[in-house]
Image (cartoon, helix red, strand yellow):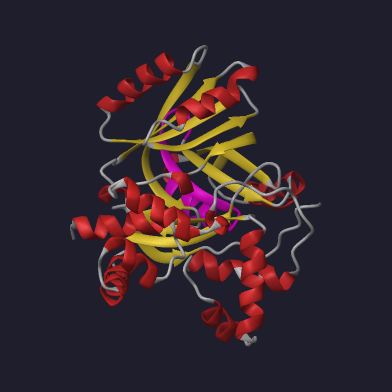
Amino acid sequence: MELSEEDLDLINALQIAPRISWSDAADVLGVHATTLAARWERLRSAGAAWTTAHLIGDPKQMCLALVDIDCDMRLRADVTAALAAIPEVVTVEEAASNRDLILTVITPTLTAFTDTVVPQFKEIEGLQKYRTSLCTRLHTGGHAWRLNVLDRSQQAALKALAGPETSSAAAPVGPELPQSHLDLIPFLAQDGRATAADMARALGRNPATVQRQVNRLLASRVLSFRCEVAQKFSGYPVTCQWFANVPAGQHEAAAAELRGFRNLRLSASTTGRTNFVIVMWLHSLSDVMNAELALQQRIPGIELVESVVVLSSAKRVGWMLNPDTTASGAVVVPVAELNPTA
């Protein structure tokens, strides 16, 4: 299938306001609400686009780890499948570099990563070695990436309608959320637009009670909502990740400069051999060098230590992907357990 301009408009709208009502979206896009709902269902069914919610991974609240994996090449497919089946391993990518696979892992605490996730690595046949970098500051995540096909007035209107709950800014760590609220996370992982009525029916709860729980969960800012698009339809089919060093006092300035790159998917400060990671979606391999030149020109003192091109993505923020980057429909939902105060 090919995506029409109207399809891209709708995806862009849901990137800005993932949980907007169809009637509000219709007012902004100038398309009837039933038409938008039908169009979205077609895109979802084809795996071309999907909405999801996941733990935001902000180091102020939880542990975000970037893990390099070396494996037996004969067992790479088995290792990839085993890693993708671990709920805390939210993203699995095959790399053309000095590592075979790149993982993004989110856990409530560093202890949970060490005690819960790492032992599972050791049980996977064919996994030979792993190296971990821990995120110390998440500057920009994939939830902030936009197609940018809508005009400025439409984008502003959608931002106003989105409300604070879909903001990428993390709230200060608050009291622990009760389990009744955490029970909602798997439903929102499978469908970021899931309604309180949908979840109430599945859980056997009162819809009004679930709506209050949803509101509190959204207000906690532990979740990041996003509308994803199959990368092959994005216009940016190449993913490149850079491991870089940035002078310690210049990380915030570098992050601010990076937000001016419209194809930025991730920027974070990390521990390890390098202290900064950057991920971009690019038009072509030739754009890798163009991006590197732009990074060096716009970020004084940056040292680009290594560039890594992603060959394929098996899993992206919980969603299993087909080889053509569309969503398979299978979602490895996170364990509904989160204690930010632990």
Q: Nearer the viewer, residue 327 or 41?
A: 41
Q: Is residue 19 above or below residue 141?
A: below
Q: Is residue 288 left or right of residue 331?
A: left
Which residue appears at 72% of the width and 48% of the height?
A: 172
Location of residue 269 (image quadrant) = top right
Q: Is residue 35 above or below residue 70?
A: below
Q: How many marks?
A: 0
Q: Is residue 221 left or right of residue 11?
A: right
* Residue 15 visible: no
Report the quarter where the N terminus lies: bottom left
Furthest toward the top, the residue is: 301
* Residue 277 visible: yes
- Answer whether residue 77 is magenta in the image: yes
- Answer whether residue 124 is magenta in the image: no
Location of residue 46 (image quadrant) = bottom left
Which residue appears at 45% of the width and 53% of the height?
A: 159
**Magenta segment range?**
75-99
At which x and y percent is residue 120? Answer: 65, 52
Which residue appears at 29% of the width and 50% of the height?
A: 150
Q: Nearer the viewer, residue 329 or 259?
A: 259
At which x and y percent is residue 4? Answer: 18, 58
Q: In this view, does 165 lie above or below 139?
A: below
At which x and y percent is residue 296? Answer: 42, 15
Which residue appears at 29% of the width and 48% of the height?
A: 151
At which x and y percent is residue 55? Answer: 60, 54
Q: Is residue 202 left or right of residue 312?
A: right
Q: Nearer the viewer, residue 298 or 70?
A: 298
